[in-house]
Image (cartoon, helix red, strand yellow):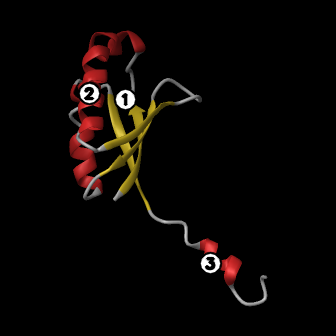
């Protein structure tokens, strides 16, 4: 299952509180990438944070892996995990009368 995972900063969390965890955060991301859970990771452009495209058996399996990030374990972030599926509207292009 493909998932879009967006970090959610917790109320009161600050970048100064993040700093001691950042090296371990990157290491954990690398481990998840090598294991095939993290497929792509991007810095958000609207605010500090990340967007991850992940692959997991279920939303809960992804949440379990994401909760192991040091910032999540420290209670500084949580995750919004959005399941994605194939875009099926391409079929409209081939419906009769749309040629």
| Residue located at (30% from left, 30% from top) | 29
Which dot marks residue 91?
A: 3
Residue that mark 1 sits on:
10
Which quarter of the figure has residue 14?
top left
Q: Position of residue 24 (x, y in %)?
A: 24, 19
Q: Nearer the viewer, mark 2 or mark 3?
A: 3
Whichever of labels 1 and 3 marks the residue nearer the N terminus, that label is 1
Foreground of the two, 85 or 71: 85
| Residue located at (27% from left, 48% from top) | 62
Foreground of the two, 29 or 35: 35
| Residue located at (38% from left, 55% from top) | 2
Q: Are marks 1 and 2 in contact (CB under 8 Å)?
A: yes
Residue that mark 2 sits on:
75
Q: Position of residue 74 (x, y in %)?
A: 23, 23
Foreground of the two, 51 or 96: 96
Whichever of labels 2 and 3 marks the residue nearer the N terminus, that label is 2
Above or below for 17 versus 28: above
Q: Secondary structure at mark 1?
A: loop
How far, Cα to Cα, is label 2 from label 3? 44 Å
Q: Are marks 1 and 3 in contact (CB under 8 Å)?
A: no
Residue 69 seen by the camera: no
Q: Label 1 neighbourhood size at 10 Å, few (<14), some (14-19), many (20+)?
A: few
Q: Position of residue 64 (x, y in %)?
A: 21, 44
């Amino acid at each position: 299952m493909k998932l879009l995972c967006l970090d959610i900063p917790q109320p009161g969390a600050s970048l100064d509180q993040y700093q001691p965890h950042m090296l371990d955060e990157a290491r954990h991301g690398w481990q998840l990438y090598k294991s095939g859970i993290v497929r792509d990771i991007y810095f958000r452009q609207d605010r500090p944070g990340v967007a991850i495209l992940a692959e997991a058996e279920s939303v809960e399996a992804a949440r379990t892996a994401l909760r192991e990030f040091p910032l999540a374990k420290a209670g500084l972030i949580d995750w919004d995990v959005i399941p994605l599926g194939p875009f099926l509207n391409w079929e409209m292009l081939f419906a009769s009368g749309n040629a």
